[in-house]
Image: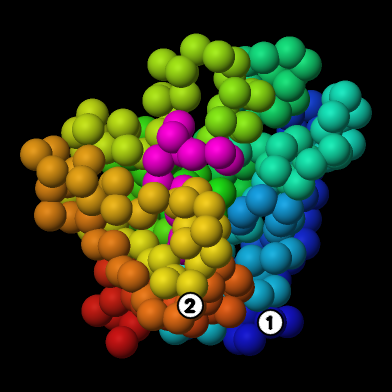
Amino acid sequence: MSFGGKLLKLSHDSPITKTKMNVNIYFPKQYFDSTSTESKIPVLLYLAGLTCDPNNGSEKAFFQPYADKYGFAVVYPDTSPRGVGNPGEDDSWEFGTAAGFYVDAETKPWNNNYKMYSYILKDLLPSVGKAYTKLDLTRVSVTGHSMGGYGALMFFLKNPGFFKSVSAFAPICNPSEVPWGFTNFGGYLGDDKSKWLEYDPVHLIKKYDGPKSTILYHVGTKDGFEVDQHQLRPETLVEASKGTVLDGYVEYKSVKDFDHSYYFVASFAGEHSAHHAKYLGLTSSKL
């Protein structure tokens, strides 16, 4: 049990990564309530950051009480395949294990297993929907933190209309222009920077032609990865949105004194949950 629902810690064999993949799923109280007016439960996909696994978000982000309030499930994927054995896989916390960067790798040997983009869309979500038929995989929103915040923005913008809404906590908005992107795009995709742009939210927003929904993200003024290293570049997505379909729909909130930690994520999980509930069609029936 967790809050009013249940958190399951699961694993499955993925034909895409060719490894066992771990995933946590929080089922809200409505999932078990036979009197609930919701016949099917929508899903919020939570993408974690560098070094993380499915436990970080499910133990520290505190989406569960809001999932119970509105009536959505939360799916927490892993951040990479594990135990593949590629040379250098565990040499750095910024690349390899727990740092899949949500791309489909094209360079050897990473392209054999590190296919997190396809894994999420073509394996994990369909598998969850097949295993738990009360979940509504036609109503999915996405959020994430840091690398996962970039992943949330990227998945939303790269797949117009697939996700009902998107939000992010301290996202890497313009990865093709920052050190984390140099390391991961270069390592997984190679030297052709045109391939990097296929995953960069700042470039994807310029081509986006899907439904108009607000992109919400928060960044703390004491986030060292931005203040000291300039890894996040949160203003770039606002600038890139000008003149696009999403002009006026990018809501960047700079929040005083917050850092990059899960204390920061948990502090704004309620606001992000309300944002997603609105687009998942849950707000009016749950408030």
Q: How far apart, in angstroms, are the residues tagged by discs 2 and 1?
A: 27 Å
The residue that appears at 62% across and 54% down in the rendered structure is 49
The residue that appears at 13% across and 48% down in the rendered structure is 247
Color theme of the render: rainbow
Q: How many marks?
A: 2
Q: Which residues are magenta?
A: 169-180
The kind of residue on which mark 1 rests is Ser
User: Where's residue 284, x and y in %?
Assistant: 24, 79
Q: Is residue 1 above or below residue 248?
A: below
Q: Which residue is mark 2?
A: 258
User: Where's residue 122, x and y in %?
Assistant: 56, 32
In the orientation shown, which residue stands out farthest toward the left?
A: 243
The kind of residue on which mark 2 rests is Phe
User: Where's residue 184, x and y in %?
Assistant: 62, 32
Asked whether residue 47 is in view, the answer is no
Q: Tag on residue 2?
A: 1
The residue that appears at 71% across and 56% down in the rendered structure is 52
Q: Quadrant of residue 146?
A: bottom right
Asked whether residue 264 is in view, the answer is yes
Mark 1, residues whose alpha carbon is within 10 Å: few (<14), some, or many (≥20)? Answer: some
SS at mark 1 in the image: loop
* Residues at discs 2 and 1 in contact (Cβ within 8 Å): no
SS at mark 2 in the image: loop
Is 136 left or right of 234, judged from the image as shown?
right
Q: Is residue 170 above or below residue 59?
A: above
The residue that appears at 29% across and 47% down in the rendered structure is 237
Q: Is residue 179 covered in magenta?
A: yes
